[in-house]
């Protein structure tokens, strides 16, 4: 009878044999011995542990423990784990300064660095350990590109902070800045807020970008059940990591690759969840980029098509008062899938890293708290939490988290207040130069123009903190944090730096926003627009050296997922 390792070599081959077997590989084996591997360890499948642990990102400071648990699981199942690191940016710390220009760009660097390490060292399989914003999609892009057996286990969400009986997240701290500037909160109250909002390690406690992408990883089938919602500080997260380490060996043995999992059905399921749970607007960028690497085409219009038939069942912070720990207690992503399946909205034949299909994974799942996950017949709204807007101002599309928009701002027409940078807009907001009815326009913050497509959490939070979020809209060719709420419309494409109409808006121009109608329109005569266009000149690049200079030269429109030119 063949051993498990013998079976692997005879039937499917072991990728790492290319660097281990044969006379000419004696130098390679010598180097393996130099890192302390025994002959037995060298013979086993080599599993790359791709860890984004570091000491500065709250969502990643615990990933060393996740990594050790994964390695224990790999060893228990007969593999040899070998860990390497990737970079990881904390978007909260990078917010509202030069650092935010580098956040989205880190996604491509992460994908490229994993490709280099995995290819150079001929790993048989990969376990990815991400948690925060751009790390998850960057690693998913790498997994799709490499197409070797892979599984994801994230670090998990932070527990919500508390103020009396009220849950807190980082959103309240950002909004507190605006409230303090408006005299609605004392500096002492703001200080108490900052001390209470982030009580544990983990990705910020609401349905912000990090948690959106970890939930979508589970929905795509690349993470085990529970990956999206088990809190970072729960021991169950460690057990999940051990299971992921063991499961990668099964995926290697069965030769189940990301290409088998990341199919049209998987992306359809993920987009259903996106709409039902109200993910961050950044999820649109990232799903499109991941799909591109997987060879699956996603058009922005498809998001609206899926949204139209997907009820919004869950509203976590910033759209509501629940948090990730509440979603976990309510049954998590598998419970969401089971509820959506009552209307036949989930493809149950999609393969997952469990080695079986979605239908098998959810057969025993159910919603445990209908206050957190609404019954499918009693949704928050009959359509999904995101909307793609089109019109003369965004012929290639724009995106808004409509589940976090006040009813009175779903349709709005107002005068443009035009700013060529985030800093200019924030100064005007904090100096109380914005009045009810205004439509704030922040441009030259797109993928190319920023460069790097900064998140506009500071201006949107300042607006909310000053009590203007139900009276003022904001549009930008930049992005928003998942923590943003209000009539905040981002990803306007084409961007200003590429000659998009957003670059031709002048102070006082009327802008019409129709979120239910998926329309975004500049109410200016075509003749005037044509005259302005003839006078427009592409501005000088804002960064003229280093990685972001190269990024600006390679990146495409947000309507493509801000992927690189090929």
Image (cartoon, grey):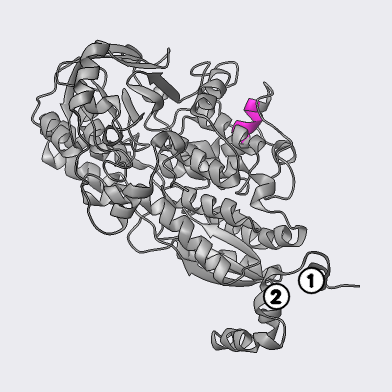
Give residue 264's quadrant in the image.
Answer: top right
Q: Nearer the viewer, residue 566 or 366?
A: 566
Is mark 1 in CB contact (under 8 Å) with mark 2? yes
> Which residue corresponds to the image point at 13% horizontal and 23% vertical from the top-left?
434
Q: Is residue 527 left or right of residue 235?
A: left
* Residue 311 visible in image: no
Q: Quick check: 369 left or right of 471?
A: right
The CA span between labels 1 and 2 is 9 Å
- Residue that mark 1 sits on: 9
Q: Give SS at disc 2.
A: helix
The residue sitting at 79% across, 71% down in the picture is: 9
Image: 114 above or below 506: below
Percent across and percent down for residue 230 are 53, 47
Residue 229 appears at what percent x and percent y? 52, 43
Does residue 339 show up magenta in the picture? yes
Is any atom of residue 383 visible in this view?
yes
Outermost residue on the front side: it is 534
Q: Point out the stretch of residues depicted in magenta.
A: 335-340
Q: Is residue 139 above or below residue 534?
A: below
Crowding around mark 1 (Cα neighbors within 10 Å: few <14, some 14 to 19, many 20+) is: some
Residue 522 placement, left or right of 220: left
Q: Secondary structure at mark 1?
A: helix
**Quarter that holds the N terminus:** bottom right
The disc placed on residue 17 is 2
Q: Main secondary structure of the magenta part?
A: helix
Q: Position of residue 21 (x, y in %)?
A: 71, 81
Residue 397 lies within the magenta run = no
Of labels 1 and 2, earlier in sequence is 1
Percent of width and height locating residue 543: 22, 51
Question: Vertically, is 373 above or below 171?
Answer: above
Asked whether 236 or 526 is in front, the reply is: 526
């Amino acid at each position: 009878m063949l051993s498990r390792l013998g079976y692997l070599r005879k039937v499917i081959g072991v990728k790492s044999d290319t660097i281990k077997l044969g006379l000419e590989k004696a130098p390679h084996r010598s180097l393996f011995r130099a890192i302390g591997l025994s002959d037995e360890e060298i013979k086993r499948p080599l599993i790359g542990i791709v860890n984004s642990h570091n000491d500065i990102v709250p969502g990643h400071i615990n990933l060393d423990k996740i990594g050790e648990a994964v390695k224990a699981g790999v060893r228990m199942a007969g593999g040899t784990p070998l860990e390497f690191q990737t970079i990881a940016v904390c978007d909260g710390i990078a917010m509202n300064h030069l650092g935010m220009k580098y956040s989205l760009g880190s996604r491509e660097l992460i994908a490229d660095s994993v490709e280099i390490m995995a290819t150079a060292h001929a790993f048989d399989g990969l376990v990815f350990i991400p948690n925060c914003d751009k790390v998850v999609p960057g690693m998913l892009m790498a997994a799709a590109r490499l197409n070797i057996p892979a599984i994801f286990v994230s670090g998990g969400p932070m527990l919500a902070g508390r103020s009396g009986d009220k849950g807190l997240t980082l959103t309240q701290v950002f909004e507190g800045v605006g409230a303090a500037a408006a005299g609605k909160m004392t500096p002492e109250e703001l200080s108490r807020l900052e001390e209470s909002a982030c009580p544990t390690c983990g990705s910020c406690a609401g349905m912000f970008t990090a948690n959106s992408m970890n939930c979508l990883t589970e929905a795509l089938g690349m993470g085990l059940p529970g990956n999206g919602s088990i809190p970072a500080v729960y021991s169950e997260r460690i057990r999940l990591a051990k299971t992921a380490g063991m499961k990668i060996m099964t995926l290697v043995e069965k030769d189940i690759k990301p290409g088998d999992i990341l199919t049209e059905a998987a992306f359809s399921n993920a987009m259903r969840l996106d709409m039902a749970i109200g993910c961050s607007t950044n999820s649109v960028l990232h799903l499109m980029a991941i799909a591109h690497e997987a060879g699956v085409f996603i058009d922005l219009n498809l998001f609206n098509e899926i949204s139209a038939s997907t009820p919004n069942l869950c509203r976590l912070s910033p759209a509501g008062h629940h948090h990730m720990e509440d979603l976990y207690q309510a049954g998590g992503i598998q419970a969401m899938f089971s509820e959506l399946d009552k209307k036949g909205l989930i493809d149950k034949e999609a393969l997952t890293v469990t080695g079986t299909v979605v239908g098998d994974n959810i057969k025993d799942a159910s919603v445990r708290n209908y206050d957190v996950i609404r019954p499918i017949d009693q949704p928050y709204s009959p359509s999904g939490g995101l909307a793609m807007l089109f019109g003369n101002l965004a012929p290639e599309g724009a995106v808004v988290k409509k589940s976090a928009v006040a009813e009175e701002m779903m349709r709005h027409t107002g005068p443009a207040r035009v700013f060529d940078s985030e800093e200019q807009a924030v100064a005007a907001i904090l100096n109380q130069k914005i009045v009810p009815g205004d439509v704030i326009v922040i441009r030259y913050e797109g993928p190319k123009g920023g460069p790097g497509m900064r998140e506009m959490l500071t201006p949107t939070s300042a607006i909310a903190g000053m009590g203007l979020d139900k009276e003022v809209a904001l549009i930008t060719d930049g992005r928003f944090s998942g923590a943003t709420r209000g009539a905040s419309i981002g990803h306007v494409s084409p961007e200003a730096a590429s000659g998009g109409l957003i670059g031709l808006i002048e102070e006082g121009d009327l802008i019409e926003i129709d979120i239910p109608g998926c329309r975004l329109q500049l109410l200016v005569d075509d003749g005037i627009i044509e005259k302005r266009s003839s006078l427009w000149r592409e501005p000088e690049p804002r960064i003229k050296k280093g990685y972001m200079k190269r990024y600006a030269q390679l990146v495409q429109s947000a309507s493509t997922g801000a992927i690189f030119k090929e």
